[in-house]
């Protein structure tokens, strides 16, 4: 794999700096009250630089959600890899780990709090096709890489189910992360195990 060019690396650092600035501001203020000018100041750049990079507030918010989703997915992938020989344990570890991280995540906390007028929740629900699609596709590919016995369609269906459940539990937490993870694993683990074993799922 070739290294990114200097320009691409610099741009990547700039984007991370801007998104990190949003993280810091969201700890102190509602998303609806955070202006693009405040984000730019927090990152130490001009507002025009911010707009040049993301285009609009909506695009910035979407990039922010996608960045956090990527972080959660990486955590889930590590947990699954550590328990690859036990699909149920893999799902439990991945789910509980993601939900634990989500509980302390500024963006998720803002969504759970129901930040009025922010539009954040819509980015993972009514207007969440991009986030759901990207997360499901990535997780499906990881499922196949981890368990090659899975068919692509089975992996896609399983991954989308896991992603949808993770979003639901993160936005509407009803139990501890460990209990939620164990419940989801108990429900989906046997199904996934049967698919990996190459058996037909009936019912």
Image (tube, helix red, strand yellow):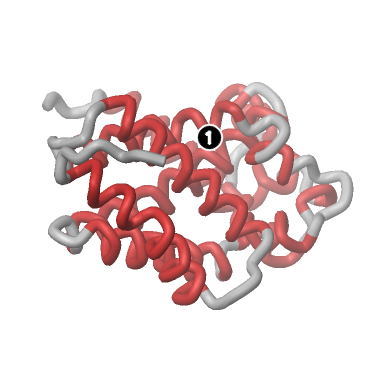
Instruction: Name which quarter of the figure residue 150 lies in.
Output: top left
- How dense is the environment of label 1, judged by Cα within 10 Å: few (below 14), some, or many (20 and up)? many
| Secondary structure beneath label 1 | helix
Q: Position of residue 86 (x, y in %)?
A: 19, 61
At horizontal 73% and vertical 66% (from top left) the residue drawn is: 28
At horizontal 45% and vertical 47% (from top left) the residue drawn is: 162
At horizontal 60% and vertical 22% (from top left) the residue drawn is: 52
Q: Position of residue 5 (x, y in %)?
A: 25, 24
Instruction: Name which quarter of the figure residue 59 lies in.
Output: top right
In the image, farthest residue toward the front: 203
- Comparing 180 with 13, the one in front is 180
Q: Position of residue 13 (x, y in %)?
A: 40, 40
Q: How many marks?
A: 1
In the image, farthest residue toward the right: 116
What residue does disc 1 label?
A: 132
- Comparing 46 with 1, the one in front is 1
At horizontal 57% and vertical 42% (from top left) the residue drawn is: 64
- In the image, residue 189 above or below residue 159: below
Instruction: Name which quarter of the figure residue 159 lies in.
Output: top left
Image quadrant for the N terminus? Answer: top left
Image quadrant for the C terminus? Answer: top left
Q: Is 90 left or right of 187, judged from the image as shown?
A: left
- Comparing 165 with 102, the one in front is 165
- In the image, residue 28 above or below residue 43: below
Q: Position of residue 115 (x, y in %)?
A: 81, 55
């Amino acid at each position: 794999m070739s290294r990114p060019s200097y320009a691409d690396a610099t741009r990547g650092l700039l984007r991370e700096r801007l998104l990190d600035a949003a993280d810091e501001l969201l700890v102190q203020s509602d998303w609806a009250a955070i202006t693009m000018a405040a984000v730019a100041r927090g990152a130490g750049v001009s507002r025009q630089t911010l707009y040049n990079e993301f285009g609009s507030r909506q695009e910035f918010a979407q990039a922010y959600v996608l960045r956090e989703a990527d972080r959660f997915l990486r955590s889930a992938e590590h947990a699954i890899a550590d328990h690859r020989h036990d699909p149920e344990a893999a799902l439990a570890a991945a789910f509980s780990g993601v939900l634990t991280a989500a509980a302390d995540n500024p963006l998720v906390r803002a969504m759970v709090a129901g930040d009025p007028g922010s539009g954040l929740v819509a980015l993972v629900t009514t207007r969440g096709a991009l986030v759901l699609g990207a997360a499901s596709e990535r997780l499906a590919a990881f499922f196949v890489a981890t368990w090659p016995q899975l068919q692509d369609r089975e992996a896609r269906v399983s991954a989308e189910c896991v992603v949808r459940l993770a979003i639901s539990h993160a936005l509407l937490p009803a139990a501890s992360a460990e209990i939620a993870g164990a419940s989801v694993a108990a429900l989906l683990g046997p199904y996934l195990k049967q698919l990996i074993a190459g058996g037909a799922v009936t019912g």
